[in-house]
Amino acid sequence: MWVITVFADQNVTMYEFETESEAREFIRAIKGRKILSHVVYYNDKILEGAVS
């Protein structure tokens, strides 16, 4: 899961995405300070570096 945290004015908003490409596409349109995080749960299957 990918999470974008946005700090704008006095507000904090979080958006969740399934893929990194979705998150990176969305982050370009957001105004304010942004943090993109990759959240990995202990029970998630690790697919980093996997070839499809």
Image (spheres, rainbow, N blue to C red):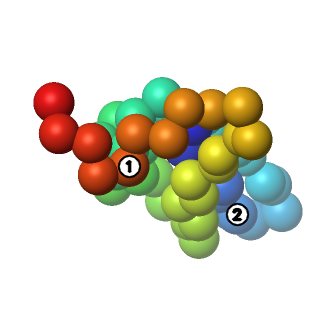
Q: Is residue 51 shown above or below 24? A: above
- The type of residue carrying mark 1 is Glu
The label number, if any, that marks residue 7 in the structure image = 2
Q: In the shown orientation, is residue 38 left or right of residue 43?
A: left
Residue 13 x %, y %: 73, 46
The furthest residue to the right: 10
Residue at 72% x, 31% y is: 43
Crowding around mark 2 (Cα neighbors within 10 Å: few <14, some 14 to 19, many 20+) is some
Residue 18 x %, y %: 48, 29
Q: Secondary structure at mark 2?
A: strand
Q: Secondary structure at mark 1?
A: loop
Q: CA distance from mark 1 to mark 2?
A: 29 Å
> In the rendered image, which residue does mark 1 sit on?
48
Crowding around mark 1 (Cα neighbors within 10 Å: few <14, some 14 to 19, many 20+) is few
Q: Is residue 26 visible?
A: no
Residue 24 x %, y %: 34, 50
The furthest residue to the left: 52
- The type of residue carrying mark 2 is Phe
Q: In the shown orientation, is residue 37 left or right of residue 11?
A: left
Q: Is residue 45 shown above or below 48? A: above
